[in-house]
Image (cartoon, rainbow, N blue to C red):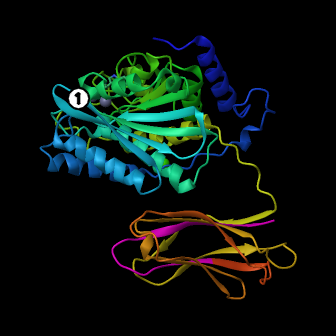
Amino acid sequence: MNLSVPRRAVAAAALTALALGGLTGTAGAEPRAASALAAAPDIPLANVKQHLTDLQAIATANGGNRAHGRPGYKASIDFVKAKLDAVGYTTTIQQFSYNGTTGYNLIADWPGGDPNQVVMAGAHLDSVSSGAGINDNGSGSAGVLEAALAVARAGYQPSKHLRFGWWGAEELGLVGSKYYVNQLPTTERSKFAGYLNFDMIGSPNPGYFVYDDDPVIEKTFKDYFAGLGVPTEIETEGDGRSDHASFKNVGIPVGGLFTGASRVKTSAQVTKWGGTATAFDRCYHSSCDTTSNINDTALDRNSDAIAHALWTLSGATTEPPTGKVFENTADVSIPDNGVAVTSTVNVTGVAGNAPSTLKVDVNIVHTYVGDLVVDLVAPDGTVYNLHNRTGGSADNIVQTYTVNASSEVANGAWKLRAQDRASADTGYISGVKLTFP
Ligand code: DTR
Ligand code: CA
Ligand code: ZN
Ligand code: ZN
């Protein structure tokens, strides 16, 4: 069942315009320079691999797998949901029944954006019953999860609405994603600008395959890899082989990435990508699909490509900041339960005093913000407290504070000071930015 062509054409046109840095998704709007689009952050490989370690532990603790109908699958759903709830997502667990057992999809909406233009990224979270399913498909699940967490860390406010999905029972025939799409009223389906699918993105002998479906989404991915100098190929066997098919079947524009399964890498592909003329993933659907069955470079590149596509296709534009901006983006480690550390911003060329509405953007990565005391210290040593041990076990402080600094001379060395005052969790100052009108 396909939605009417005009909507797809409009969606494609909007995505085309958007991905090419053109219109802001509104017909007739003045084209904006591509540079006005917010750039995606780098996705830390270490974070993605930590998710895989956690999923491996879940499988190990639950009979060795994360398959539909087994305890390891629901434990995986609960793990991903908790991460997203902690950073402000609106999450929903959707139940369905298959083979007499209950299955679960997890849907996570990032508040904001045009609800009539939904960009969704998804991955199936279930494994086969023979193993932990770390590449198939912990890799896609973890890459999508970390991209979603990066959206929260950045406090990203895209033009379009961002939604994320983790599907159940894909291995039994795309059951969870089919259920989700079939439950969507036609009016809701027509709001999708695109669905991006990530199923096996860390294969140990990787290829770099891009789905040949929606041309705009395909181009977004191909351009990203071209920017890395990594050649890509069209995924020719993808049709029907993963959850994007459920969306494509109802006329939603789809795309995605894949690093290969049991097929054998050709000698030409070895020349192109390295590796060996053996299976892209020799542990496909096997018990050896564990955390050792991952190629880090492929996982990192594809995770970064997920973020790039989300930022590009969701179309946020950043108005150049008014006034003068001073920032320090160097990471400064915050010792656990230890001394205070600082990140210094040297302000120059600003006449007179600072404003009563000094904008202070703080980005601190931490696993328990209730440990932290965070202050802004003016050049003359005056302390303005920004955060004082609130927030409990929530992760990260990504926030804009407005400080009445009108009694302070603007020029000088301003310091963001952070101290961890309780043991067992730690983190780092990722950046601080001061904006003067
Ligand atoms: N069906 C997927 C693996 C798979 C095989 N070919 C493709 C092509 C595109 C995406 C995924 C796949 C699974 O076993 O989960
Ligand atoms: Ca990265
Ligand atoms: Zn599979
Ligand atoms: Zn899969």
Q: Is residue 231 left or right of residue 25?
A: left
User: At 19% across and 38% down in the image, what residue appears?
Assistant: 288
- Number of numbered callouts drawn: 1
Residue under the image location 16 percent in, 38 percent down = 70
Residue assigned mark 1: 97
Which corner quadrant of the image does residue 29 belong to? Answer: top right
Q: Quadrant of the N terminus?
A: top left
For ligand 1, give the image quadrant: top left
Q: Secondary structure at mark 1?
A: strand
Q: As rendered, which of 247 and 240 lies closer to the eye?
A: 247
Write the residue at 23% across / 38% down: 289
* Image location (x, y in percent) of residue 84: 41, 51
| Image coordinates for residue 262, horizontal then vertical, percent | 27, 24
Local crowd size for mark 1, using a 10 Å CA cut-off: few (<14), some (14–19), many (≥20): some
Residue 208 visible in rendering: no
Bounds of the magenta span?
Answer: 416-437
> Residue 376 lies in what quarter of the image?
bottom right
The vertical placement of 295 against 170, above or below, is: below
Q: Give the image location of residue 83, x and y in percent.
A: 38, 53
Dominant SS of magenta comes to: strand
